[in-house]
Every structure is written in C-alpha cells, then in structure tokens.
Amino acid sequence: MYIVMLGAPGTGKGTIGKILSQDLNLSALSTGDIFREQINKRTVLGKKIQSYIESGNLVPDDVTIETVKSRLLEDDVKDGAILDGFPRTVAQAEALRIFLKENRPQAKRVAIELDVPDDEIIRRVVNRLICTNKSCGAIYNRETKPPKQVGICDICGSELKRRKDDNEETVTKRLGIYHQNSKDLIDFYRKNNALYSIYPKELDVAVKNIKEFLEEYRRK
C-alpha cells in the first residue's frame, strides 16, 4: 500500500508518518530527502534539482515526478511506502496513479489528510522547540509537550531551539498557500474514493483510527 500524507505544516504529518512507517513496516519517503540524495550523488536529476533550488525556484512537476518515480522503482518500496511531500499537485497525483497502475498494479493507494484548525496549527508551531542535534531531531512544545528541563532535550541532552520562521506571521502565510494549493489535490483523492480525513487531536487515538481505516481499506 502506498500512503500519501496530506496536511498543512504543523499538523503532525512527520510524526504520524514515522509511527505508521514503523508499525506497518513501510519505508517513509519525503521529497526533500529524495532531492538531497540525488544532489549528493550528483546525478543528472540532482544537478537539475540543485539549479532550481539555488535560483530560489520550486522544482517543477516534471522533474519532481521523474525523481520520485526513480525512487519508487527501488526494491525497498516495491510493496508500498509512506509519501510525505509528494504529490503536491493534481498533476503529480495523476502521475503517481499512472505509475502505480503500470508498475504496481496490485498495490492500493490512499491519502490520509490531517485536518487541523488553523488557529491550533499556529499555536502548535509558535510553541514548537526542536533538538539542535540533527541525529536526534526530537520535537517538543512549550504548552503540550514541554521538556523535563527547560531548553534541554530529554533524549540526548542537546539544546532545544525555536526556528526563526516559527512565528505567527510566517505560519499564517504558509497556511494560506497550503489551502490554496491543496484544495484540488484533496478533491482529486476524494473523487477517487481514496481519502481519509482525520482531526488528530490526540496522537495515540489518531494513529489507532488511521491504522483501523487502512486495515479495512486493504481488505476492500
């Protein structure tokens, strides 16, 4: 099964995606990681990607699609994967549908939308603290999940910091862009009967409900 994670920044896609990856034994793929891998390997695709990023432009659909397709052909994701950051457009979603139909005809695909009210997302993000140790990367929240010791990671003891762009103005702009760009994509999966929307108010409950839905969807 190929699971597409949808949701605005701050909804918990990364956290829930990681849990599902471990529980379902599926590789978790993010577009950013795939791009960095291509850039580090200095492939033809990697050089194209780097040129767009360095010029401050978004990587276009055709290059993104080609890059993700090449990753999905690798053995570790032949039985499924969790996709974070792809697809972002209807064109990418349609390309994924065709790719799976041609290369993984027995595989199911589904989109999980984490639907969180904007005011809660803003509150989450402006209170977010991230471990500065990149190999740890633990995330805390000053209101809902504070560290035991102020400013110190419970796991590795490194310093916790707030990202400069984790402020209300920037988050509000991001949300506006997300809602504008995601409407057609969400409609695409809804019309294809491949969308499950959930408000992940409590992490454990949300994960449980998503896994129950996926199990039922798998049996269809």
Image (cartoon, rainbow, N blue to C red):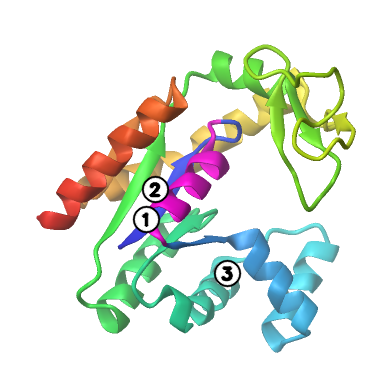
Residue at position x 37%, y 30% from top? 206
**Quadrant occupied by the C terminus:** bottom left
Amino acid residing under circle 3: Thr
What type is the residue that disc 2 sits on? Leu
SS category of the residue bearing label 2 = helix
Q: Which mark is residue 24?
A: 1
Tell me the CA gap for discs 2 and 1: 25 Å
Element marked by disc 3:
helix
* Depicted 158 relative to depicted 83: above or below: above
In magenta segment, residue 186: no
Name the residue that disc number 3 marks.
Answer: 64
- Earlier in the chain: of badge 3 and badge 2, it is 3
Disc 3 crowd, CA 10 A, few/some/many (<14, 14-19, 20+): many
Where the N terminus falls, by quadrant? bottom left
The residue carrying pointer 2 sits among few (fewer than 14), some (14 to 19) or many (20 or more) residues within 10 Å by Cα, namely some
Structural distance between the alpha carbons of marks 1 and 3: 26 Å
Specify whether residue 20 is painted magenta: yes
Marks 1 and 3 close (CB-CB < 8 Å): no
Mark 2 vs mark 1: give the one in front: 1
Q: Is the C-beta separation of discs 3 and 2 under 8 Å?
A: no
Residue that carries the numbered disc 2 in the rendered image: 185
CB-based contact (under 8 Å), mark 2 and mark 1? no
Residue 211, horizontal then vertical, whole percent = 30, 43
Query: Which of disc 1 and disc 2 is earlier in sequence?
Result: 1
Main structural element of the magenta stretch: helix, strand or loop? helix
Q: Which residues are magenta?
A: 11-25
